[in-house]
Amino acid sequence: MTTISKCLLDVSFEEALGRLEKLVVSMEDGEISLAELVEQYEEGTGYLRVCQKHLRDAELKIEKLKKEHDSWETETFEPDTTTEDSL
C-alpha cells in the first residue's frame, strides 16, 4: 500500500492536479537534467496519489449517498467522448 506524504495531506484535488499538469509539461519539455527529471517524477507520484485519494473518497461518498436511497443504484460512469469540435 502506498502512502501520501504528510505535507500533501491537505492539498486539494484541484491543487494537486494543477501541480501534476505543470510537472508533466516541464518533464516533456526536455530542458531539465536527468536528476531534476527523477525528482519531478517522484514529486508527481505524490500528487498523483493525492488525486487518486480524492477521487476514491468522492466515489465512496457518492456510493454511500446512493445506498441511502432505495431507488438509486450504483452505475458505471461513462465519460463523454465528444470533442469540442463535434459540439
Image (spheres, grey):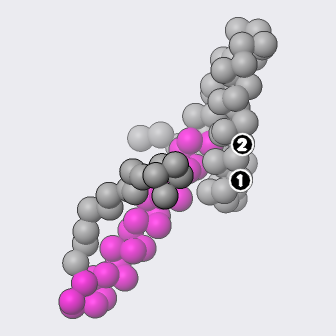
63 displayed left or right of 29: left
Which of the labelled discs sits on residue 55, or is there none? none
Q: Determine if the magenta segment contains residue 54.
A: yes
Q: Which residue is mark 1?
A: 15
Q: SS class of the residue under badge 1?
A: helix
Left or right: 32, with 51 as reference point = right
State yes or no: discs 1 and 2 in contact (Cβ < 8 Å). Answer: yes
Give the extent of the magenta segment: 47-72
Kind of residue at disc 1: Glu
In this view, the residue in front, 21 or 12, is 21
Residue at image coords 62%, 42% = 47
Q: Look at 66% across and 56% down and name the residue there.
A: 14
Give the camera-side residue of 17 and 84. Answer: 84
Q: Which residue is mark 2?
A: 19
- Dominant SS of magenta comes to helix
Q: Position of residue 8 (x, y in %)?
A: 68, 49
Left/right of residue 40 with respect to residue 69 in the rendered view: right
Q: Quadrant of the N terminus?
A: top left
Identity of the residue drawn at 40% across and 65% down: 59
